[in-house]
Amino acid sequence: MARVENKVVLISGGASGIGAATARRVIAEGGKAVLADRDAAKGEALAKELGKAVAFVPLDVTDEPAWQKAVTTTVETFGGLHGLLNAAGVGVRNSIEDCSLEEYRRVNDINSMGTFLGCKQAIPAMAKTIKEQGGGGSIVNISSVLGLRGASYAMAYCASKGAVRSLTKNVALHCAQMKYGIRCNSVHPGYIDTPMIAPRLSGTIDNMSGRQWLETLHPLGRLGQAEEVANMILFLLSDESGFSTGSEFVCDGGLTA
């Protein structure tokens, strides 16, 4: 049997990177996916490529009515909602001294508040689906290794991803106490070769290219691939991870070791 047979998953940031890679894995394993993203051109193109089991909905993750519409569209299109992946995010370089208030708010609005809004809007629809159809639900929030440790060059990003880590535990406990049948876990990637870090790869740091410098941070000696993170997410979306909730799953090539 396919690992997420007939499960419906809503994916923020679904047009590219980890979100897109996860959508491909969900479809390959018998599920249905709704890609939610600000980039309509990429999202619609990917949905068309992946076929009838995929739909696209425009989404600004900082806009609560847009989240409400994304959840409603998902349920109306595929008859329910079993899984949510909060993968939309932004990364910037700044320190505590040079980060402006405006930039700090922008990074946290997208990474942290966007994840909060996704969980808040998806939980009632997921609980209703589970009550009516049985089975279980799963929320996966993309945090980062920088949600587990600090980095002097990424202050706002660290703060936002640390918030995602703590939010995940709160959501997991709430859903368990309410007996919704919904689990919630966070995934903490290292540096993954996706569009988000592309601007950093061609620069120069300590007489190395940006790519080489980032690769040296990982004991495995390379950047991660979106598909490798998607494989971990698929496990968490599936019933195979049925006894895991409120936990941190690290995919970082040994960086935090």
Image (spheres, helix red, strand yellow):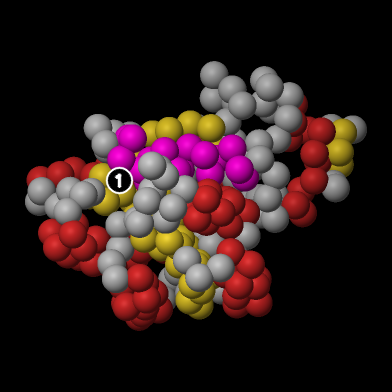
Quadrant of residue 185 within the rendered picture: top left
- Which segment did they paint magenta? 226-241
Where residue 43 sits in the image (x, y, percent)? 59, 71
Query: Going 41% across and 38% down the picture, which residue do you hit?
Result: 235
Query: Going 56% across and 68% down the picture, which residue do you hit?
Result: 51
Identify the residue position indicated by label 1 in the image. Answer: 184
* Secondary structure found at label 1: strand
What is the quadrant of the C terminus in the image? top right
Q: Is residue 146 above or below residue 44?
A: above
Residue at the right extreme, as displayed: 207
Q: Is residue 189 above or below residue 110?
A: above
Where residue 161 sits in the image (x, y, percent)? 46, 47
Q: Main secondary structure of the magenta part?
A: helix
Please say whether residue 112 is visible from this viewpoint: no
Query: Going 58% across and 64% down the picture, which residue do you hit?
Result: 50
Query: Going 68% across and 22% down the picture, which residue do you hit?
Result: 220
Q: Amino acid at mark 1?
A: Cys
In the image shown, does 78 or 15 lie closer to the viewer? 78
Is residue 236 a member of the stretch shown in magenta?
A: yes
Is residue 45 a member of the stretch shown in magenta?
A: no
Q: Residues within 10 Å of mark 1 (few under 14, many from 20)?
A: many
Where residue 216 sits in the image (x, y, percent)? 74, 26
Going by the image, does 243 lie left or right of 149? left
Q: Is residue 137 above or below residue 11?
A: above
Q: Is residue 130 above or below residue 172?
A: below
Where residue 97 sits in the image (x, y, percent)? 60, 50
What is the quadrant of the N terminus in the image? top left
Going by the image, does 202 lie left or right of 194? right
